[in-house]
Image (cartoon, rainbow, N blue to C red):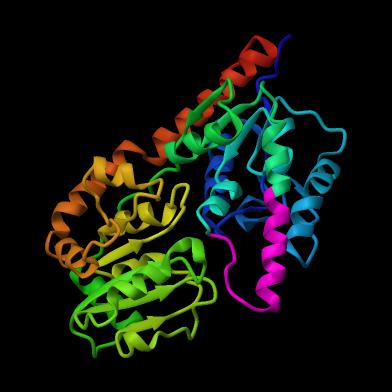
Amino acid sequence: MSLSSQPTLCLIHEAIGPYSAIAKIAELQVRTALDAGWSLSVVAKRLDESLHDRVNWLRLTVPRRMFLLKWLTARHFIRTAIGDRRFDVIHAHQPQVADIADVFHCHFLTRVAYERKCLEQRPGLRPRLIRLQQQGVLYAEDRCYRRWNPATHMVFCSELIRREFSRLYGPPPAQEVLVNSCPPIDFPTADQRLAARRRWVGNDFKGLVLGYIGGLQERKGFKSVLRALAGKKEIFLLMGGQFTDGFSDPALAGRMKSVGLVSDVKSFFHACDAVIVPSLFEPLGLVAFEAAAAGAPVIATEQVGALPHLLEHDAGLLWEQGQDLPALVRLAAAQRARFNAGAVRLAEAISEERQSRRLLEIYDEVLRQKHGVLPAK
């Protein structure tokens, strides 16, 4: 069987663009395929405006309320969006259609979050409803992963998620780890750091600033940071993410600021002497790479998939249970030049160019497997 000079690719994710970590990854993959000459269709509800005229946008319907309903209906709406179209390669980021994908990108395992007691824990009626929905997603996701297609090329965002998937569901025959790429290095000047600090913190605090972007999710580990900084007057906590706007902890009165969702993450990181990723379960943690590339040394727990890469290139530090967090912040700030040099090595080792090249190689492998030939270059 022969292929035309322009093979066809369908990439599936609810959002493609600067909307979330996975959406950013999906956008980079779309641009990579376009630059390589693929004819591209995308199934998505949200698509970055700059891509509207470059791809065939198969608009995805997503119910407005209840994330369990969204999860359970996603397969139907994705299949509806695709219709009777055929593609040389289907690349999916959503487990609901992992079985029909030639390439499936695994970013999360709800079962692991459940095992580590990271799901909704708060008392009350609304949290209970959230808990019930999470339980429904858990069983639905299990069902998807237990019937994965052995012909699908499984791509994991970290060694951590690959290992956990194999433990829970068995090792897929075709699998590999393709770590989400590190953004290009963009270290701030002294003036930029000062301006960012004034913008996010103000002029009153003279100590060290520790940044956190993860919102008020149990899984993100923010409570452990609050406990570790209670009574430590030399550290200011700059807190961002979903539901953090206006959040405060009396034990950190005058030494913390919560800013809600952060659109300008680079400026946020420029204001920080270090950034903490304290998650109880984080398959990768793109925020760690973004912080390192922006010049902020990263402190992370062993449950963060990005940690081995930070340690390998000396771009960050491990925070172990019971370890003095303020001491690590002081070390990170004092040796900022060391960790910045490590960030440069990190960005070179898992650059967008390197990871994109490997993705295209995976697509070529799928073409060989399905058609026995590659498209004309």
Q: Quadrant of the N terminus?
A: top right
Tell whether 196 sits left or right of 60.
Answer: left
Q: Quadrant of residue 206?
A: bottom left
Query: The C terminus lies in which quarter of the figure?
Result: top right
The residue range painted magenta reads 118-138
Q: Position of residue 343 (x, y in %)?
A: 25, 49
Q: In screen coordinates, is 236 left or right of 36?
A: left
Q: Mainly helix, strand or loop, the magenta region?
A: helix
Please tell me which residue is depicted at 55% across the width and 58% down the height of the picture: 20
Residue 79 x, y percent position in the rendering:
82, 41
Please state if 62 lies on the left or on the right of 16 as rendered. right
User: In this view of the protein, which residue sits in the foreground, 185 or 243?
Assistant: 243
Query: Residue, x 63% and y 42% (percent of image)?
Result: 93
Question: Where 225 sits versus 41, above or below?
Answer: below
Looking at the rendered structure, the number of numbered marks drawn on it comes to 0
Name the quadrant containing residue 82: top right
Can you give x and y, in whole percent of width and height, for residue 66 in the image? 76, 65
* Rendering quarter of residue 265: bottom left
On whether residue 351 falls in the magenta region, the answer is no
In the foreground, 245 or 268:
245
Q: Nearer the viewer, residue 145 or 92?
A: 145
